Amino acid sequence: MSDLILTYGLQYAGYVVEAVVCLLLIWQGRWRRLRVLFLYVASLFLLDGVARSASLSFFGQSSRQYFYFYWVSDVGLALGAFLLVCAFFRRAFSPDKKKWAVVRLSLISVFVIVLGVSALSLTKNYADLSTEFIVEFSQNLYFSCLVLNTLLYVMIQQLEIEDDELGLLVCGLGVQFAGEAASLALVHVTVGGTFATNLFRYFSPLFTLGMLFIWIYAIGKNPQAIALNTKLGKKPRLLEAVAD
């Protein structure tokens, strides 16, 4: 009983903090400048917090309907995460048009490769081709996001890009990706052992909370300075890239 309370408590705490992030962006008037981030967090709240919970209550956890809805919505969230990573790359490199052209082509290539590799799953299992492809595509895309986000964070440090907000946003996303990847790896290594499975169930929402709290700190950091620069007609370096 206490395990269920802890699990549901962490999950619903995540939903509440997701709503707080959206409200904070709206309240500060920064949701347009950070619209990709806003849409991603809003989709987390609506798909994971509202739609999945409704599907679970209506169909039941063991139903095929809930299974299909869960993985289809997971693909949607994975695509949202990939677009968010692309937006972060654009914010970092758009001031240099030549570099951004190369980076944009690389990101498109990564997506095409992920799509192609995932399509190979269709040759392995003919029982349920659509489900097999959806699961493979979602997992491969999340792994690509982890690699790309880590690469971006290293590049920000190496190139000394002066955008503290971007660094924090990328760091927060990295906490989510790296934490869940490590937990899932432990589950696979232990072949779905009870300890690893329980660890993943508890730590997965904790990683999400860690990401959201880092984003709240990044969004709320020196909003007055940003507003002052805007009023004076000064545009902070790289600050408008995501919005463009």
Image (cartoon, grey):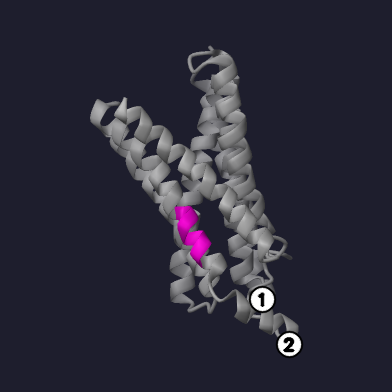
Residue at the (61%, 81%) spot, across then down: 225
Q: Residue 186 or 19: which is nearer the viewer?
A: 19
Mark 1 element type: loop
The answer to whether residue 50 shows anywhere in this view is: yes
Q: Pick out the residue farthest to the bottom.
A: 232
Q: Is residue 237 magenta?
A: no
Give residue 239's quadrant in the image: bottom right
Name the quarter where the N terminus is drawn.
Answer: top left
In this rendering, would 12 be left or right of 183? Answer: right
Q: Residue 135 or 51: which is nearer the viewer?
A: 51
Name the quarter where the C terminus is drawn.
Answer: bottom right
Q: Give, as a three-letter code, the residue at label 1.
A: Pro
Q: Measured from the top left, where is residue 100 in percent x and y?
A: 65, 68
Start-end of magenta stretch: 211-217
User: Tag on residue 232?
Assistant: 2
Q: Give, as a three-letter code, the residue at label 2.
A: Leu
Q: Are marks 1 and 2 in contact (CB under 8 Å)?
A: no
User: Tag on residue 95?
Assistant: 1
Give residue 88's quadrant in the image: bottom right
Secondary structure that dominates the magenta span: helix
The answer to whether residue 34 shows anywhere in this view is: no
Q: Residue 70 or 120: which is nearer the viewer?
A: 70
